[in-house]
Image: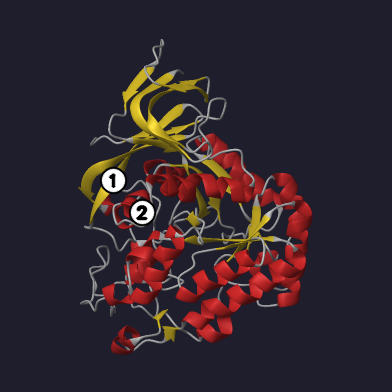
Amino acid sequence: MTILIKNGRVINPATQMDETADVLVENGTVAKIAKGIKAECDREIDAKGCFVMPGFIDMHVHLRDPGFEQKETIETGCKAAAHGGFTTILAMPNTKPVVDNPDVVNYVHNKAKMVGVVNVLQVGAVTKGQKGKELSDIEGMVKAGIPAISEDGKSVMNAQLYREGMELAEKYGIVVLAHCEDINLVNGGVMNADENAEKLGVKGITNSVEDIIIARDIMLSRDTGAKLHLCHCSTKASVSLVKYAKTEGIRVTAEVCPHHFTLTSDDIKKIEPKMDPEKKLAIDADADTNYKMNPPLRSREDVQALKEGLRDNVMDVIATDHAPHTFADKNTSMKKAPFGIVGLETAASLTYTELVAGGYLTPMQMAEKMSYNPAKIIGLDKGDIAPGKVADIVIFDPKKKYTIDKSTFASKGRNTPFDGRSVTGKVRTTIVGGRIVYEDAAK
């Protein structure tokens, strides 16, 4: 298929290109970028006023498949990714069974290829069953194509075992994706440790829960030489620690999620008990559990530090931590509800609204943090739409204003705190390998 994208603002961090031009796509690759291209094509797209960028790469997605298909499937997760402008996603291993061997890796990769929407790279667990007792078959999973290992959802609390996992990651040239949480310090906490938690009568999660493990993992990265990527950073100290690590030449990168640079714990409000639409019963509820995620929403001071860390390129990546749950899962109290929200379909709009329109990032930085940097970190030949590269492209309209409506999501998950929020900037078209996999019907 030949596609000609006309009159867009082409933003390509790999070449530092930022100018109005046409993009010709032929046989799955970018054939030419220039002004005034004339060519026979199967499809011409007028991208006037829009950004034409490398397809977004999400380093942190929960597809829930295998084992929790009532929450999400590989198909629905991939469709949600396409709606959000993501052309490649990394799937976390905390499924059932846990992705701790090549067979489960192959299952996900094969199923994603059958679905054929976006590229899926499965991440392997650090330990068997994510139980923190013995290492997974890391070598076997590397041969099956994992780009990284992670114990996401928890930390490997045994530092020596984690060190051994890092040594193998360094040996095989893959990345360690770190969920930084001292489980002993959590002590049953469900939201940020502040006056809001006190008002709701629930235990809080202190910043030190995250900061202590970040510091530990940075030191282990220094000792082993492993590439460490810190997931969903949420604290002011996390930015300082990453800055320190980079100053010391330690191989550390870090990501921030849109909810952590957009919301604070002040946004969590008490609510009246909700109704189960199937059982017609009131459910014990104290606050909107769509605001419950791990790490939790922090203070305004933390949010400001994260924005500045992204602006100053201390923090490298914007990822979603897309974590779908069913209505029944979330329709309970803050104490009982699982952590997590969906994010694939709102990330780009929130990033543009809060950071680009908000004056923290340039459009080039947005492309870097959502595409080019993730590709570099995992050693993927993507995040670049120069001629000759695979045509993974997103067309993003920065002037489009709309209201987020969870009922329109392609994801099975509707657990978002952003339903009804007005934003600026919307994904218009997503192209994967030269194929149009999503177009905004409301454009």
Residue that numbered label 1 is attached to: 425
Type of amino acid under label 1: Gly
Residue shown at the point (65%, 70%) measured from the top left:
218
Q: Quadrant for residue 330, please give it.
A: bottom left
Residue shown at the point (31%, 57%) measured from the top left:
354
3D distance between C-alphas at marks 2 and 1: 9 Å
Quadrant assignment for the C terminus: top left
Helix or strand or loop: what does disc 1 sit on?
strand
Residue 102: give x, y in percent of width and height.
Answer: 71, 50
Left or right: 244, with 174 as reference point: left
Q: Nearer the viewer, residue 362 or 124?
A: 362
Left or right: 18, with 161 as reference point: left
Near mark 1 (Cα within 10 A), the count class, few <14, some 14-19 or many ≥20, is: many
Residue 410: give x, y in percent of width and height.
Answer: 35, 46
Residue that numbered label 2 is attached to: 351
Left or right: 67, with 85 as reference point: right
136 in relation to 406, above or below: below
Residue shown at the point (48%, 26%) measured from the top left:
434
Q: Quadrant for residue 161, please give it.
A: bottom right
Q: Does residue 73 appear anywhere in the picture? A: no
Q: Earlier in the sequence, mark 2 or mark 1?
A: 2
Left or right: 216, with 183 as reference point: right
The answer to whether marks 2 and 1 mark residues whose Cβ atoms lie closer than 8 Å is yes
